[in-house]
Image (tube, rainbow, N blue to C red):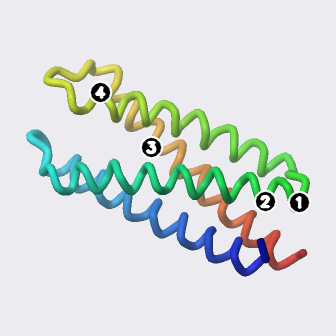
């Protein structure tokens, strides 16, 4: 995989991430019952984003040994993503535990803080190799 492919995948991951965030924000604003088309778009974009992000990270870690910022960003992003998957899955239940709503909001902010740093670092690696 060439560096330009990594840059393209990084930008695609960033665009999907923005789409997921915007859809999630709109779902939050509209409230229950969630519009099914938007809810499914949010879920499907998330699945594609996860697959692309994992593939991207594996390739980047193979090409370049990760530094501490990359390791920390990957760790925070992973924990936040797992929290979002569990809490997001519970959003379709009739009664959502309050703790899950708070966990979903906190994990969203954690992912919003860590994932863009990871993408910027990957893009900067592409230019330094």
Q: Are marks 2 and 1 in contact (CB under 8 Å)?
A: yes
At mark 4, the secondary structure is: helix
Task: Tell me the distance, in whole angstroms, between the alpha carbons under discs 1 and 4.
Answer: 37 Å
Q: Residue at x 34, y 24 (%)?
A: 100
Mark 1 Cα shell of 10 Å, populated few (<14), some (14-19), many (≥20): few
Of badges 1 and 3, the one in the foreground is 1
From the image, tell me which residue sits under label 2: 60
Precedes in sequence: disc 2 or disc 3? 2
From the image, tell me which residue sits under label 3: 108
Mark identifier at residue 64: 1
From the image, tell me which residue sits under label 4: 90
At mark 3, the secondary structure is: helix
Precedes in sequence: disc 1 or disc 4? 1
Precedes in sequence: disc 2 or disc 4? 2
Give 21 or 94, whichever is nearer the viewer.
94
Give the mark count.
4
In-image side of 110 versus 101 (left or right): right
Precedes in sequence: disc 4 or disc 3? 4
At mark 1, the secondary structure is: loop
Mark 4 Cα shell of 10 Å, populated few (<14), some (14-19), many (≥20): some
Extreme-left residue of the structure: 33
């Amino acid at each position: 995989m060439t560096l330009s492919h990594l840059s393209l995948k990084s930008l695609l991951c960033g665009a999907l991430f923005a789409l997921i965030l915007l859809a999630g924000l709109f779902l939050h604003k509209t409230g229950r019952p969630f519009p099914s088309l938007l809810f499914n778009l949010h879920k499907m974009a998330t699945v594609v984003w996860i697959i692309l992000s994992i593939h991207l990270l594996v390739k980047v870690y193979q090409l370049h040994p990760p530094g501490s910022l990359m390791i920390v960003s990957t760790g925070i992003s992973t924990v936040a993503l797992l929290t979002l998957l569990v809490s997001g899955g519970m959003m379709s239940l009739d009664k959502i535990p309050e703790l899950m709503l708070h966990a979903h909001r906190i994990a969203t902010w954690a992912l919003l803080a860590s994932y863009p740093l990871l993408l910027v670092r990957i893009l900067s690696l592409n230019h330094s190799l």
